[in-house]
Amino acid sequence: MTIIITAFERSPDGGKGLARDTRVRWALEEVGQPYEVRLVSFHAMKEPAHLGLHPFGQIPTYEDGDLVLFETGAIVLHLAERHAGLLPDDTNARARAITWMFAALNTVEPPILELVTVKFLEGDKPWSTERLPLVRDRIRHRLDQLSARLGEADWLDGAFSAGDLMMVSVLLRLRLSGILDEFPNLAAYVARGEARPAYRRAFAAQWAINAKPPAG
Amino acid sequence: MTIIITAFERSPDGGKGLARDTRVRWALEEVGQPYEVRLVSFHAMKEPAHLGLHPFGQIPTYEDGDLVLFETGAIVLHLAERHAGLLPDDTNARARAITWMFAALNTVEPPILELVTVKFLEGDKPWSTERLPLVRDRIRHRLDQLSARLGEADWLDGAFSAGDLMMVSVLLRLRLSGILDEFPNLAAYVARGEARPAYRRAFAAQWAINAKPPAG
């Protein structure tokens, strides 16, 4: 059975690897599963065919025979549970790795996504400039706590896991903001993630689609 | 082995059941596992002992012998995987139920939590009044999509699952805003969740702690 994921026909980030398909590509590369990609336009994402796969009209989706999944966290967890490479064998360590997946998505990413709100969704509002430092400070607060927990370790809990894959992916969104560099151990942690061969293959695959010049 | 969770010594919501320990209590009640509660003050949540359990200084945490977990999603999933009652037996249906857990926490809850930002964290800012309708519209956009997917079904994907437990818990945060009532099928869905005996036991347990008058 061929695994099929969806991705932006053209990512808004121009190939920086921040669209969520990169997270799924990375997981697929870590567990050594081949996959195909179906590209979706912004228009098609809001059409019934795609909404049947993803009720919130986003990418990526995951199809494997009869199984259709959405939500990056669920797709990565599904792959991690079925294939070796992203979760430890020990039951307790496994539950802790999954905890870091949820922490990345539910505790660390939401304040980071507020940067998108303040800059893009509300970039034309009169409060935008004054609000930005508040949003940045809320991100710093979370990163302070994460940095304290990581300390000098390579990964969040023992060996590299799906929890690290997700946390590195979330932190990568901060690179352009300059905030990540305020936390040297977190910047080094992200760099370790990016240096993994599986990440590099995933990044290259999305780059090949998103960084090419427009056709015609 | 006794399961121990942490909860607010006194919840900021005064017993409305919106603190995240209610989600874990509900899951424990659904799977029929007894548990004990250790109450934590706002001060103690930021102290090293609690930060050792929860790096972001929040509640709930979960302790079961040597295993320590944080993140409500991870705790509920851990319980759902180990005990019957919160995940279907069929492998694909199980993956889809877990998808709804992530959708609740990562796609539906973040715009809802912005209500807290606009009303409390930024309630004294000059833009607060003008920004509120934007935040409310972003919530409505998600709820439109969720409402379309749920349709006339009782639960999101077949029988009640951990995905519904999490989605109902997230939507409950909207009750006071009036937005939930704009979507009758979602309001009925939440009411079905609240009517479950396990939810009622969980609610009553947190109410007993949070709704009593201050001592002295």
Image (cartoon, coloured by chain):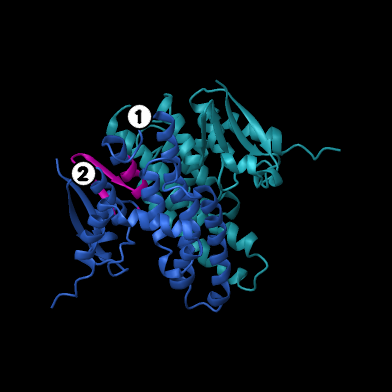
Chain colours: A blue, B cyan
Whether discs 1 and 2 lie on one chain: the answer is no
CA neighbours of label 1 inside 10 A, class few (<14), some (14 to 19), many (20+): many
The question of residue A60 being in magenta is answered with: yes
The residues colored magenta run A56-77
Where does residue A130 sit, x and y in percent of width and height? 58, 75
Where does residue A139 sit, x and y in percent of width and height? 53, 61
Residue sitting at x 22%, y 61%: A204
Tell me, for residue B88, which label it has, or none: 1
Alpha-carbon span between mark 1 and mark 2: 28 Å
Tell me, for residue A137, which label it has, or none: none
Q: Where, by quadrant of the figure, is residue B81 drawn? A: top left
Residue sitting at x 55%, y 79%: A126
- Which residue occupies the foreground of this view, A109 or B111? A109
Q: Amino acid at mark 2?
A: Gly
Q: Is residue A5 above or below residue A173?
A: above
Q: Is residue A57 above or below residue B1?
A: below
Q: Amino acid at mark 1?
A: Pro
Q: Secondary structure at mark 2?
A: loop
Q: Secondary structure at mark 1?
A: loop
Which is more foreground, mark 1 or mark 2?
2
Mark yes or no: residue B189 visible. no
Q: Where, by quadrant of the figure, is residue B122 drawn? A: bottom right
Mark yes or no: residue A77 visible. yes
- Which residue occupies the foreground of this view, B71 or B48? B48
Residue sitting at x 54%, y 77%: A129
* Chain letter of disc 1 in the image: B
CA neighbours of label 2 inside 10 A, class few (<14), some (14 to 19), many (20+): few
* Chain letter of disc 2 in the image: A
Where does residue B115 sit, x and y in percent of width and height? 57, 58
Tell me, for residue A32, which label it has, or none: 2
Where does residue B59 sit, x and y in percent of width and height? 59, 42
